[in-house]
Image (cartoon, rainbow, N blue to C red):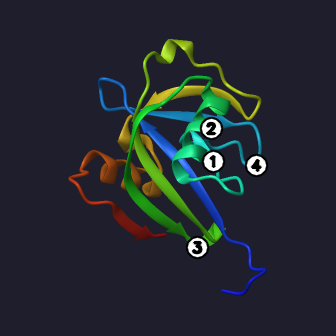
Amino acid sequence: MAFNDTFRLSSHAVIFNQSNEVLMLKATYGDCSWGLPGGALEPGETIHEALKRECLEEIGIEIFSPLLTGVYFHKHYNSHAFIFHCTVVDTKKIKLSEEHSEWRYFSIDHLSTVQSIRINDCLKYINSVVSRKF
């Protein structure tokens, strides 16, 4: 990799409800797709700092007990995504930023293939971080 090449890193939260459904946010930009809370690291941030900052910005509540469960390379975006299993105190207090128009919980079988793999890896986590390429 050359010095001026562009490479991205992002951190994302997997937040389950009591039915093991996953919290997803609908973007107001790009293709307006559904995705996990989180986003790109800022210069000088750790993956944990970015995760907490992005979640606070996007859903307006703090996440707790972030546990890194997977690291995923996405060729299309030339990026690595760090996926964390997280908890929140009360989703009733979610306040979306302008980046998202709505939130809801999805069952895993209603997610894209890539999202399903990442979420299932999170559910099956046993003391070993998964690493995959897409």
**First-in-chain label (4 vs 2):** 4
Question: Which label sits in the foreground, 4 or 3?
Answer: 3
Q: Earlier in the sequence, mark 3 or mark 1?
A: 1
Q: Amino acid at mark 3?
A: Lys
Task: Determine which of the numbered discs, if any, sits on residue 30 in the image.
Answer: 4
Q: Nearer the viewer, mark 2 or mark 1?
A: 2
Does residue 51 appear left or right of residue 32 in this picture?
left
* CA gap, disc 4 and disc 2: 21 Å
Circle 4 crowding by C-alpha within 10 Å: few under 14, some 14–19, many from 20: few
Image point (45%, 51%), residue name: 83
Contact flag, marks 4 and 3 (Cβ < 8 Å): no
Within the image, what quadrant is residue 67 found in? Answer: top left
Please, what is the three-letter code of the amino acid marked with disc 2? Arg
* Disc number for residue 53: 2
Q: Which residue is mark 3?
A: 75
**Closer to viewer: mark 1 or mark 4:** 1
**Contact (Cβ within 8 Å) of mark 3 with mark 1:** no
Horizontal relation, residue 3 to residue 38: left or right: right
Camera-nearest label, 3 or 1: 1
Helix, strand or loop status at disc 3: helix
User: 94 or 34, which is in the foreground?
Assistant: 94
Q: Which residue is mark 1?
A: 39
